[in-house]
Image (spheres, rainbow, N blue to C red):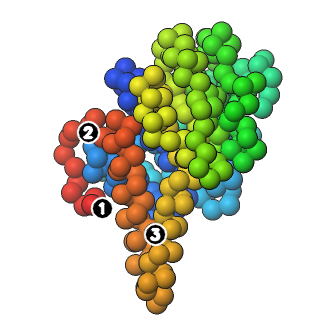
Amino acid sequence: MYVSMKEMLLHASEHRYAVMAINCVNLEQAKAICYAADAEAAPVIINISPRQMKAHATPEVMVPLIRALAEPLDVPVALNLDHGAEFKDITRCIRAGYSSVMVDASQYDFEENIRRTRLVTALAHERGISVEAELGHVGQAAAGDGQEADFYTRVDKAVEFVERTHCDALAVAIGTAHGSYPDNYVPQLDFDRLAQLKEALNMPLVLHGGSGAGEANIRKAVALGINKINVCTDLFRHQRAAMHKQLNTEPTIDYMDIQMHGMQAACAFIRSYMHMIGSSGRYQFRHTGDAYD
Ligand code: 13P
C-alpha cells in the first residue's frame, strides 16, 4: 500500500511503537526497504532529503518507482520529503506524488516557523498528504548540537505550535543530532522532556538523528512516545561496508551482484531495527514471499 504517514503514525502512537523512516536514494535501497517491510509485516516510511533529491533521487523518478514497489504490498509504505526547507522543493514533491512532506522551518523564530508550517499543511492536507514539522532544532552531531539544551523543544510552545499549524507529526529536539557522533560517544537524551511532550500533545512524535543514538536510548524513547525514527547514516554506512567487504574478497564481482550484496545487507539491518522499535508484525496480512531473508 502506498499511503500517507498519518494513519500509520496514529496507530503507532496509540499502540506505543515506532515506524522506521529510512533515507533512500536509489532502486536498490527502495527495494531493500520495501522487502524488509513486507518480510516483517511492518509499516515503513521512505525519506528523501532535498540534497538527496537534487543530487540523485529526483521526485519524478522516485515516486513512480516507489509506488510500483509499494502498491502490491499489504503493508503501508509512505514516501516523505525529509527536511523540506524551501517552498519550491515541497511543492515539487507534492506535485510529483509524494504521500507526505516534512516542512523544516526550525531555523526560523517561532512565529515564522508557524507561518511556514501552516502554508504547507493547508496545501498538503487538501490533497490527503500528511505533514511533519519540527519545533526546537535537531542539529548536527559533528557540531555537538545534540547536547545544546537551548535547541530543545519546549512543551508549552509545542502545544501552541500544533494547535496553530495542524501538523500530523512533530519532530522534537531532545538530545539527538544528525550524522556521526565521535567514536564511543552515546548521547544523553532528555527523557523527562519527552514524557512531558507526549503527555501534553498526545500525537505522533518524531526522533531525528537515529544513527548512533544507542539501543537503550532508542528503546526508551519508543516506550515514552516516539513513533517515527529517522535513520540515514547507519544504513548507508552498513550498506557501503558490506559492498566494500565483498569487493575486497571478490574484486571482479559483477556490477549487479555487488548491488545485490548491498541490498541484502540493507534489508537485514532494517529488519533487525524494525524488531527493536516494535514495528515488526503490526500488519499481519499475506506477504509476497520474495523478501530478502
Ligand atoms: P542520521 O543520519 O543521524 O541517522 O539522521 C537521519 C535523519 O534524522 C534524517 O532526517
Q: Nearer the viewer, mark 3 or mark 1?
A: 3
Q: How far apart are marks 2 and 3 (CA)?
A: 27 Å
Q: Viewed as shown, does residue 70 lie left or right of 154?
A: left
Q: In this figure, which residue is indicated by the disc labeled 2? A: 281
Q: Give, as a three-letter code, the residue at label 3.
A: Ala
Which residue is at 68% across, 13% downward? Answer: 157
Mark 2: secondary structure: loop
Residue 100 against residue 135 in the figure, above or below: below
Q: Viewed as shown, does residue 17 lie left or right of 248?
A: left
Q: Distance between the residues labelled 3 and 1?
A: 15 Å
Q: In this figure, which residue is indicated by the disc labeled 3? A: 242
Q: Nearer the viewer, residue 44 or 236?
A: 236
Which residue is at 78% across, 17% downward? Answer: 111
Determine whether label 3 and label 1 are within 8 Å by CB. Answer: no
Q: Quadrant of the N terminus?
A: top left
Answer with mark 3 or mark 1, whichever residue precedes in sequence: 3
Q: Which of 199 and 59 is in front in this view?
A: 199
